[in-house]
């Protein structure tokens, strides 16, 4: 385990996907509005953080892994705020494609007493233009030789198109790179031939058109997706039930959750895929990488809002847990 964490800082991982901004309005509630049956939130502070593919990059940076973030931002004030946050966390914004045709994706969450009251989205979800796709592909191709793995962060906001995805996967496979996808339900059939996908159990069930109600149905879905999409592996996240890893030629491995408390699952999928790929790139087996990602997820869901885990914190948490077993 120590060798894996020692090697984490030597990796460089390329992320392609839907870059977002997350805004949190924090407050308290002590009355219901006289205008409608909704709570009146007294806002006390406002915080901004990176979301979507940018949060994947931030998770990698906290693990001391260098991210190469490729995505799309609007030519607007939120793009400037996004670039400012990227600079703050030492993530380059030079690989982003800026366009006048769509806004920078923004998700605003109002939180009262540690509970999300409502979320408001400002976004454009239609596919990016052909010209934008060409710019993304050009940037992707130029950076393949200096990366250890590829993460595709698909939130269905229009960046990961069918054509772009096929070309990205083809280029990465020719280089022999590990390709991980955080999938969107409607795009599942486009992920053929990647190294791993990391759906939650709802997404996996939707994609395979079979409800997961027990371990038998879970295994039917997991192995079914492996065969259907010609995958090397599948990691299905299962909330309070942990994770299940399916690998070619091996039995399924069920990993129980290590979370002590669950306050907010926002961004947990970003933490899982970032930590999994970081550990794999540092020399871990896929099972070891999944176990490390499971610990990371257990930490971030215990915090309210989009969160990440530092490399040293994660290592200490794992060692303490192993010693207490």
Image: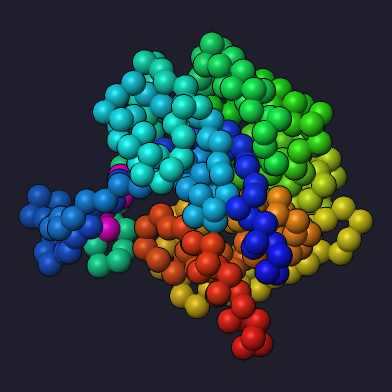
Residue at x 70% of width, y 69% of height: 1
Question: Relative to residue 195, is residue 150 drawn left or right?
Answer: left
The residue at the far bottom in this view is 324
In the image as oriented, which residue stretches furthest toward the left? 34
Closest to the observer: 187 or 88?
Answer: 88
Q: In the rendered image of this protein, does residue 15 appear above or below residue 74?
A: below
Residue 237 versus residue 166 in the image, above or below: below
In the displayed structure, does residue 113 sit left or right of residue 211? left
Q: Position of residue 13 (x, y in %)?
A: 62, 41
User: What x and y, as percent, mark residue 217?
Assistant: 75, 61
In the displayed structure image, the side of residue 237 where residue 64 appears, left or right: left
* Residue 42 seen in this snapshot: yes
Q: Which residues are magenta?
A: 106-111
Q: Residue furthest right?
A: 249
Instruction: Give above or below for 148 relative to 199.
Output: above
In this rendering, is residue 212 above or below 181?
A: below
Residue 205 visible? The answer is no
Where on the picture, by quarter, is residue 103? Answer: top left
Magenta residues: mostly which secondary structure? strand
Q: Position of residue 285 (x, y in %)?
A: 78, 59
> Is 77 placed left or right of 71 in the picture?
left
Outermost residue toward the top in this view: 131
Report the front residue among 37 and 284: 284
Residue 43: where, in percent of width, then height?
15, 55
Q: Residue at x 44, y 31 (%)?
A: 93
Front-most of residues 66 and 115 = 66
């Amino acid at each position: 385990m120590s060798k894996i964490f020692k090697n984490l800082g030597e990796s460089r991982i390329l992320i392609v996907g839907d870059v977002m901004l997350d805004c949190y309005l924090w407050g308290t509630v002590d009355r219901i509005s006289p205008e409608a049956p909704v709570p009146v939130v007294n806002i006390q502070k406002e915080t901004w953080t990176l979301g979507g593919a940018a949060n994947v990059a931030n998770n990698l940076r906290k693990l001391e892994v260098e991210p190469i973030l490729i995505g799309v931002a609007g030519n607007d004030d939120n793009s400037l705020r996004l670039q400012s946050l990227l600079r703050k966390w030492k993530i380059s914004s030079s690989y982003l494609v800026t366009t006048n045709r769509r806004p920078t994706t923004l998700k605003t969450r109002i939180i009262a007493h540690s509970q999300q009251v409502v979320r408001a989205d400002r976004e454009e979800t239609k596919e990016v233009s052909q010209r934008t796709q060409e710019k993304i592909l050009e940037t992707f191709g130029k950076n393949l030789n200096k990366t250890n793995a590829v993460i595709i962060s698909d939130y269905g906001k229009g960046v990961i198109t069918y054509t772009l995805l096929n070309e990205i996967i083809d280029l990465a496979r020719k280089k022999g790179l590990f390709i991980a996808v955080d999938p969107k339900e409607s795009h599942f059939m486009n992920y053929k031939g990647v190294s791993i996908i990391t759906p939650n159990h709802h997404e996996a069930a939707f994609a395979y058109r079979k409800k997961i109600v027990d371990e038998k149905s879970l295994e039917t879905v997991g192995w079914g997706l492996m065969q259907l999409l010609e995958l090397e592996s599948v990691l299905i996240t299962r909330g309070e039930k942990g994770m299940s890893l399916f690998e070619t030629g091996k039995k399924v491995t069920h990993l129980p959750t290590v979370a002590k408390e669950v306050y907010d699952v926002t961004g947990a999928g970003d933490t899982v895929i970032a930590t999994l790929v970081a550990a794999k790139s540092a020399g871990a087996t896929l099972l070891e990488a999944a176990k490390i990602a499971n610990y990371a997820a257990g930490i971030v869901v215990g915090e309210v809002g989009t969160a990440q885990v530092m490399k040293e914190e994660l290592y200490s948490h794992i060692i303490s847990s192993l010693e207490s077993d």
